[in-house]
Amino acid sequence: MAHQDDRFDLTGKVAVITGGGTGLGKATALLFAARGADVVVASRNLEHLQPVVEEIRALGRRAEAVATNVLDPDACDQLVASAADSMGCIDILVNNVGGARRIQPNDDWTIDEWEKVFHFNLRPSFLLSRKAVHHMGEGGAIVNVSSRAALDANATMAPYGAAKAGVNALTISLARAYAPRIRVNNVIVGAMDSDAMRAQIARGAPAVRPNVNALGRVGATDEVAHAVLFFASPASSYITGQSLVVDGGPVPMESFK
Protein backbone atom coordinates (compact mmCIF):
# COMPACT_ATOMS: atom_id res chain seq x y z
CA MET A 1 0.00 0.00 0.00
CA ALA A 2 1.30 3.48 -0.88
CA HIS A 3 2.20 5.78 1.99
CA GLN A 4 -0.79 7.90 2.96
CA ASP A 5 1.13 11.13 2.27
CA ASP A 6 1.45 10.16 -1.41
CA ARG A 7 -2.18 11.19 -1.81
CA PHE A 8 -1.02 14.79 -1.51
CA ASP A 9 1.57 14.49 -4.27
CA LEU A 10 1.08 16.87 -7.22
CA THR A 11 4.02 15.73 -9.35
CA GLY A 12 3.33 16.35 -13.03
CA LYS A 13 0.31 18.57 -12.35
CA VAL A 14 -0.12 22.12 -13.60
CA ALA A 15 -1.85 24.63 -11.32
CA VAL A 16 -3.15 28.12 -12.05
CA ILE A 17 -3.51 30.32 -8.97
CA THR A 18 -5.05 33.80 -8.99
CA GLY A 19 -3.92 36.34 -6.42
CA GLY A 20 -0.67 34.37 -6.42
CA GLY A 21 1.74 37.14 -5.50
CA THR A 22 0.90 37.60 -1.82
CA GLY A 23 -0.86 36.04 1.15
CA LEU A 24 -2.73 32.79 0.68
CA GLY A 25 -2.09 32.72 -3.07
CA LYS A 26 1.67 32.88 -2.59
CA ALA A 27 1.62 30.30 0.22
CA THR A 28 -0.47 27.96 -1.94
CA ALA A 29 1.79 28.39 -4.97
CA LEU A 30 4.91 27.54 -2.98
CA LEU A 31 3.22 24.58 -1.26
CA PHE A 32 2.01 23.18 -4.58
CA ALA A 33 5.49 23.51 -6.05
CA ALA A 34 7.01 21.76 -3.02
CA ARG A 35 4.56 18.93 -3.71
CA GLY A 36 5.71 18.69 -7.32
CA ALA A 37 3.37 20.94 -9.31
CA ASP A 38 4.27 23.41 -12.03
CA VAL A 39 2.53 26.70 -11.29
CA VAL A 40 1.14 29.71 -13.14
CA VAL A 41 0.54 32.63 -10.78
CA ALA A 42 -1.62 35.60 -11.71
CA SER A 43 -2.44 39.00 -10.25
CA ARG A 44 -2.62 42.62 -11.33
CA ASN A 45 0.85 43.38 -10.00
CA LEU A 46 3.63 41.62 -11.90
CA GLU A 47 6.18 42.87 -9.36
CA HIS A 48 4.53 40.74 -6.67
CA LEU A 49 4.53 37.67 -8.88
CA GLN A 50 8.15 37.59 -10.03
CA PRO A 51 9.69 36.72 -6.63
CA VAL A 52 7.18 33.88 -6.28
CA VAL A 53 8.13 32.56 -9.71
CA GLU A 54 11.81 32.63 -8.74
CA GLU A 55 11.11 30.69 -5.53
CA ILE A 56 9.14 28.06 -7.43
CA ARG A 57 11.86 27.64 -10.04
CA ALA A 58 14.42 27.27 -7.25
CA LEU A 59 12.42 24.21 -6.18
CA GLY A 60 12.99 22.72 -9.63
CA ARG A 61 9.49 23.33 -10.95
CA ARG A 62 8.28 25.31 -13.95
CA ALA A 63 6.62 28.63 -13.16
CA GLU A 64 5.09 31.51 -15.10
CA ALA A 65 3.70 34.89 -14.04
CA VAL A 66 0.74 36.44 -15.85
CA ALA A 67 -0.40 40.00 -15.11
CA THR A 68 -4.19 39.78 -15.07
CA ASN A 69 -7.08 42.09 -14.25
CA VAL A 70 -9.76 39.58 -13.31
CA LEU A 71 -12.46 42.24 -13.66
CA ASP A 72 -11.85 42.05 -17.43
CA PRO A 73 -13.47 38.94 -18.98
CA ASP A 74 -11.04 39.05 -21.90
CA ALA A 75 -8.10 39.08 -19.48
CA CYS A 76 -9.51 36.01 -17.75
CA ASP A 77 -9.72 34.22 -21.09
CA GLN A 78 -6.15 35.26 -21.90
CA LEU A 79 -4.86 33.97 -18.56
CA VAL A 80 -6.30 30.52 -19.18
CA ALA A 81 -5.08 30.44 -22.77
CA SER A 82 -1.59 31.61 -21.77
CA ALA A 83 -1.33 29.02 -18.98
CA ALA A 84 -2.47 26.17 -21.20
CA ASP A 85 -0.13 27.25 -24.00
CA SER A 86 2.97 27.64 -21.83
CA MET A 87 2.40 24.55 -19.66
CA GLY A 88 0.57 22.26 -22.08
CA CYS A 89 -2.51 21.74 -19.93
CA ILE A 90 -4.25 22.81 -16.74
CA ASP A 91 -4.95 20.29 -13.97
CA ILE A 92 -5.79 22.58 -11.05
CA LEU A 93 -7.40 26.01 -10.84
CA VAL A 94 -7.37 27.93 -7.55
CA ASN A 95 -9.76 30.89 -7.61
CA ASN A 96 -8.11 32.78 -4.80
CA VAL A 97 -8.32 36.41 -5.91
CA GLY A 98 -10.63 38.65 -3.89
CA GLY A 99 -10.80 41.07 -1.02
CA ALA A 100 -12.59 44.04 0.47
CA ARG A 101 -10.62 47.25 0.08
CA ARG A 102 -13.35 49.53 1.43
CA ILE A 103 -15.16 49.34 4.75
CA GLN A 104 -18.12 51.62 5.39
CA PRO A 105 -21.72 51.67 6.64
CA ASN A 106 -24.24 50.01 4.35
CA ASP A 107 -25.99 53.28 3.41
CA ASP A 108 -22.71 54.79 2.20
CA TRP A 109 -22.04 52.27 -0.58
CA THR A 110 -22.59 53.66 -4.06
CA ILE A 111 -23.88 51.36 -6.78
CA ASP A 112 -20.53 51.52 -8.59
CA GLU A 113 -18.61 50.63 -5.43
CA TRP A 114 -20.99 47.78 -4.64
CA GLU A 115 -20.74 46.31 -8.13
CA LYS A 116 -16.95 46.52 -8.23
CA VAL A 117 -16.52 44.69 -4.92
CA PHE A 118 -19.21 42.15 -5.80
CA HIS A 119 -17.82 41.39 -9.25
CA PHE A 120 -14.21 41.27 -8.04
CA ASN A 121 -15.04 38.61 -5.46
CA LEU A 122 -17.47 36.43 -7.44
CA ARG A 123 -17.30 36.80 -11.22
CA PRO A 124 -13.67 35.65 -11.77
CA SER A 125 -14.43 32.24 -10.25
CA PHE A 126 -17.17 31.76 -12.83
CA LEU A 127 -15.25 33.15 -15.81
CA LEU A 128 -12.00 31.31 -15.14
CA SER A 129 -13.63 28.00 -14.23
CA ARG A 130 -15.71 27.73 -17.38
CA LYS A 131 -12.61 28.39 -19.51
CA ALA A 132 -10.16 26.25 -17.58
CA VAL A 133 -12.30 23.10 -17.71
CA HIS A 134 -11.72 22.87 -21.46
CA HIS A 135 -8.01 22.35 -20.77
CA MET A 136 -8.51 19.85 -17.94
CA GLY A 137 -8.51 16.10 -18.25
CA GLU A 138 -10.13 13.46 -16.07
CA GLY A 139 -9.43 14.20 -12.42
CA GLY A 140 -9.09 17.96 -12.75
CA ALA A 141 -9.73 20.06 -9.67
CA ILE A 142 -11.07 23.56 -9.07
CA VAL A 143 -10.67 25.09 -5.61
CA ASN A 144 -12.55 28.29 -4.79
CA VAL A 145 -11.64 30.51 -1.87
CA SER A 146 -14.48 32.08 0.09
CA SER A 147 -14.65 33.90 3.41
CA ARG A 148 -16.20 33.56 6.86
CA ALA A 149 -17.90 36.84 5.94
CA ALA A 150 -20.25 34.79 3.74
CA LEU A 151 -21.57 33.03 6.85
CA ASP A 152 -21.46 35.88 9.36
CA ALA A 153 -21.47 39.06 7.29
CA ASN A 154 -20.11 42.29 8.71
CA ALA A 155 -22.41 45.32 8.51
CA THR A 156 -19.63 47.43 6.95
CA MET A 157 -18.69 44.91 4.24
CA ALA A 158 -22.06 44.08 2.71
CA PRO A 159 -21.02 43.51 -0.94
CA TYR A 160 -18.01 41.42 0.10
CA GLY A 161 -20.07 39.08 2.27
CA ALA A 162 -22.76 38.78 -0.39
CA ALA A 163 -20.22 37.98 -3.10
CA LYS A 164 -18.48 35.34 -1.01
CA ALA A 165 -21.87 33.75 -0.27
CA GLY A 166 -22.22 33.61 -4.03
CA VAL A 167 -18.90 31.75 -4.26
CA ASN A 168 -20.26 29.15 -1.85
CA ALA A 169 -23.31 28.60 -4.05
CA LEU A 170 -21.30 28.73 -7.27
CA THR A 171 -19.09 25.93 -5.98
CA ILE A 172 -22.07 23.59 -5.80
CA SER A 173 -23.32 24.63 -9.24
CA LEU A 174 -19.93 24.07 -10.87
CA ALA A 175 -19.47 20.74 -9.09
CA ARG A 176 -22.76 19.51 -10.54
CA ALA A 177 -21.98 20.92 -13.98
CA TYR A 178 -18.55 19.33 -14.36
CA ALA A 179 -18.95 16.03 -12.49
CA PRO A 180 -17.68 13.39 -12.71
CA ARG A 181 -14.67 14.53 -14.74
CA ILE A 182 -13.72 17.54 -12.58
CA ARG A 183 -14.13 18.14 -8.86
CA VAL A 184 -15.01 21.60 -7.50
CA ASN A 185 -14.65 22.47 -3.83
CA ASN A 186 -14.37 25.55 -1.64
CA VAL A 187 -12.27 26.74 1.31
CA ILE A 188 -14.03 29.24 3.58
CA VAL A 189 -11.32 31.27 5.30
CA GLY A 190 -11.58 33.02 8.65
CA ALA A 191 -9.21 35.60 10.14
CA MET A 192 -5.79 35.09 8.58
CA ASP A 193 -2.50 36.89 9.15
CA SER A 194 -1.90 38.49 5.77
CA ASP A 195 -1.06 41.80 4.13
CA ALA A 196 -4.74 42.14 3.19
CA MET A 197 -5.93 41.81 6.80
CA ARG A 198 -3.35 44.31 8.04
CA ALA A 199 -4.38 46.72 5.30
CA GLN A 200 -8.04 46.41 6.34
CA ILE A 201 -7.13 47.26 9.93
CA ALA A 202 -5.12 50.24 8.70
CA ARG A 203 -8.19 51.46 6.77
CA GLY A 204 -10.30 51.41 9.91
CA ALA A 205 -11.55 47.84 10.31
CA PRO A 206 -11.67 46.63 13.92
CA ALA A 207 -8.49 44.85 15.00
CA VAL A 208 -8.88 41.08 15.37
CA ARG A 209 -9.80 40.21 18.96
CA PRO A 210 -7.95 37.45 20.86
CA ASN A 211 -11.28 35.61 21.24
CA VAL A 212 -12.00 35.74 17.49
CA ASN A 213 -12.31 31.94 17.49
CA ALA A 214 -11.95 28.87 19.67
CA LEU A 215 -8.18 28.69 19.09
CA GLY A 216 -7.71 32.30 20.17
CA ARG A 217 -5.57 33.41 17.24
CA VAL A 218 -5.62 34.18 13.53
CA GLY A 219 -4.50 31.56 11.04
CA ALA A 220 -1.24 31.50 9.12
CA THR A 221 -1.40 31.51 5.34
CA ASP A 222 0.47 28.20 5.26
CA GLU A 223 -2.18 26.58 7.47
CA VAL A 224 -4.94 27.60 5.07
CA ALA A 225 -2.85 26.61 2.03
CA HIS A 226 -2.81 23.02 3.27
CA ALA A 227 -6.61 22.99 3.11
CA VAL A 228 -6.39 24.15 -0.50
CA LEU A 229 -3.84 21.39 -1.16
CA PHE A 230 -6.27 18.81 0.22
CA PHE A 231 -8.97 19.76 -2.28
CA ALA A 232 -6.49 20.02 -5.16
CA SER A 233 -4.91 16.64 -4.53
CA PRO A 234 -6.04 13.01 -4.86
CA ALA A 235 -6.53 13.02 -1.08
CA SER A 236 -10.04 14.44 -1.73
CA SER A 237 -10.82 12.27 -4.75
CA TYR A 238 -14.30 11.36 -3.41
CA ILE A 239 -15.27 14.93 -2.50
CA THR A 240 -16.91 17.54 -4.71
CA GLY A 241 -19.30 20.45 -4.20
CA GLN A 242 -18.22 20.90 -0.58
CA SER A 243 -17.02 23.81 1.54
CA LEU A 244 -14.46 23.45 4.31
CA VAL A 245 -14.46 26.18 6.96
CA VAL A 246 -10.90 26.99 8.09
CA ASP A 247 -11.44 29.64 10.75
CA GLY A 248 -10.08 28.40 14.07
CA GLY A 249 -13.41 27.10 15.29
CA PRO A 250 -16.53 28.67 16.81
CA VAL A 251 -16.23 31.69 19.10
CA PRO A 252 -16.05 30.56 22.74
CA MET A 253 -19.25 30.93 24.76
CA GLU A 254 -17.62 33.37 27.19
CA SER A 255 -17.34 35.84 24.33
CA PHE A 256 -21.12 36.26 24.44
CA LYS A 257 -21.22 37.19 28.12
Image (cartoon, rainbow, N blue to C red):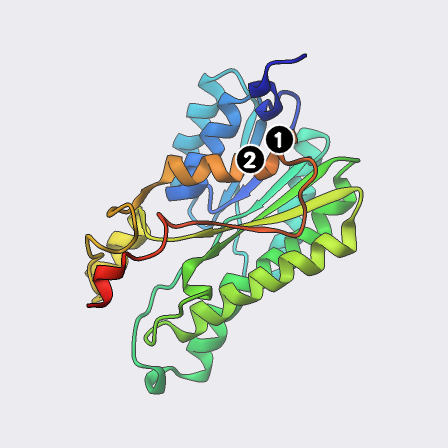
* Residue at 24% over, 48% down: 216
The answer to whether residue 182 shows anywhere in this view is: yes
| Residue designated by label 1 | 235
Q: Of helix, strand and loop, which one carries label 2?
A: helix
The N terminus: image quadrant: top right
Q: Quadrant of residue 7?
A: top right
Residue placed furthest toward the bottom = 107
Residue 247 x/y as whole percent? 38, 50
Residue 87 x/y as whole percent? 67, 30
Horizontal side of residue 123 vs 216, given as left or right: right
Horizontal side of residue 204 vs 153, given as left or right: left
116 in relation to 207, above or below: below
* Residue at 28% over, 45% down: 215
Residue 171 x/y as whole percent? 63, 56
Please rate how many residues cluster around mark 2, counting C-alpha atoms within 10 Å: few if below 14, some from 14 to 19, many from 20: some
Residue 195 x/y as whole percent? 29, 48
* Residue at 19% over, 68% down: 257
The amino acid type of the residue labelled 2 equals Phe
Give the number of the disc on residue 230. 2
Q: CA distance from mark 2 to mark 1?
A: 6 Å
The amino acid type of the residue labelled 1 equals Ala
Q: Of helix, strand and loop, which one carries label 1?
A: helix
Please rate how many residues cluster around mark 1, counting C-alpha atoms within 10 Å: few if below 14, some from 14 to 19, many from 20: some
Labelled pair 2, 1 in contact (Cβ < 8 Å): yes
* Residue at 47% over, 17% down: 59
The tally of labels here is: 2
Residues 80 and 31: in front is 31
